[in-house]
Image: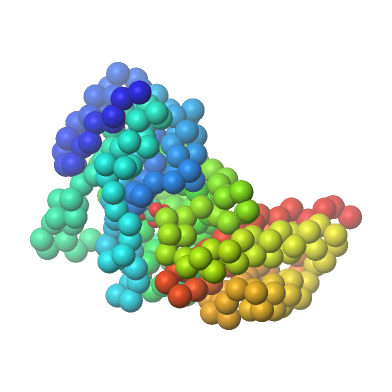
Amino acid sequence: MSTPAVITTVQAMQQQSDAWRGAGLRVGLVPTMGYLHQGHLSLVERCRQESDRTVVSIFVNPLQFGPSEDLAIYPRDLDRDLKLLEEYQVEAVFHPPAEEFYPEGFSTYVEVEGLTQGLCGAFRPGHFRGVTTVVTKLFTAVRPHLAVFGQKDYQQSAVIRRLVRDLNMGIAIVVAPTVREADGLAMSSRNLNLSEAERRRAPGLYQTLCQARESIQAGERDAGRIVARMRERIGRELTDRIDYIEVVDPDTLEPVAQIESAVVIALAVRLAKARLIDNVLVEPASS
Ligand code: PAF
């Protein structure tokens, strides 16, 4: 067990990565905003399996938070994160200060069109522009061969795949399965913002997704009916502040009306202080 080296400047990160690459080693990156939980650690584990050197970036990216979002209360604890990473044989943690990463006069942004319009993009203007800009910067700082993202942020992983393809970045994007609490709630740093009562009811989100998946597997093909049933249950049991519940194509993220092939059912809801997202990928049983 050893504490990973903490690298705080882009230049030092690039030098380290170039040295590894020069020695023929495969460099993997797990981008995070810190306050790590088992979900992040499963991405780290996956990265270690697929690379020779693992870098975890910890950077709470102000660009991806809207003015009324939770940047100020986003949890941060670097010492705790480093301790958690000790047993994962991570070679480096890249943790640049915001002033280093976004210097005075910073004015270059990266934007993926289309895929970022719907789902979370419709409710969080500028969010994905912030994500694709920071991920591009993390990629040019860490110069990884591969990067691992979680399926919980399905839209984010689809957007990153498109970014890498469109800009010929030559980085393999690995999307790892969502890690869940024992009661099914998808792990997220934002779960900390749930009240006790909300936390007790929150697993209903995943149960609703599973119910929808079962109905598709039992032959339901009408996405509108599935969404209506989900809305009714979530509204009754958890919250009526539903940003969206949608059945979409896994690649284009376009809404699907009649389910004929694989779909993603994705949702986002708001509670008092937390906004929760979750999704399942569903293959309809062939008839
Ligand atoms: O998924 C996240 O935690 C963030 O969006 C990411 C990819 C680390 C970019 O800030």
Front residue (pair 226, 169) = 226
Question: Residue at image x 42%, y 64%?
Answer: 193
Residue 112 vs residue 20, the one in the foreground:
20
Q: How is the image coloured?
A: rainbow
- The total of numbered circles placed on residues is 0
Residue shown at 24%/31% (left/top)? 5
Q: In the picture, which quadrant includes the C terminus?
A: bottom right
Q: Residue furthest bottom?
A: 240
Above/below status of 1 relative to 79: above
Drawn side of residue 134 relative to residue 114, left or right:
left
Q: Residue 176 placed where, x, y %? A: 54, 43
Residue 224: quarter of image: bottom right
Which quadrant: the N terminus?
top left
From the viewer's perspective, is 37 left or right of 16? right
Farthest-out residue, left: 104
Residue 65 to residue 231: above or below: above
Q: Quadrant of residue 134?
A: bottom left
Work out which residue is located at the far right of the displayed protein and give it.
Answer: 287
Q: Is residue 26 visible?
A: no
Q: Is residue 235 visible?
A: yes
* Residue found at the very far top of the displayed protein: 23
Please name the residue shown 15% across and 51% down the image.
100
Residue depicted at x 27% and y 45%: 78
Q: Nearer the viewer, residue 232 or 145?
A: 232
Q: Please tell me in which quadrant of the rendered image residue 61 appears.
A: bottom left
**Left or right placement of residue 233 versus residue 7 in this view:** right
Measured as percent of width and height from the top left, residue 110 is found at 32, 60
Q: Position of residue 151 (x, y in %)?
A: 54, 51
Q: Position of residue 108 (x, y in %)?
A: 23, 61
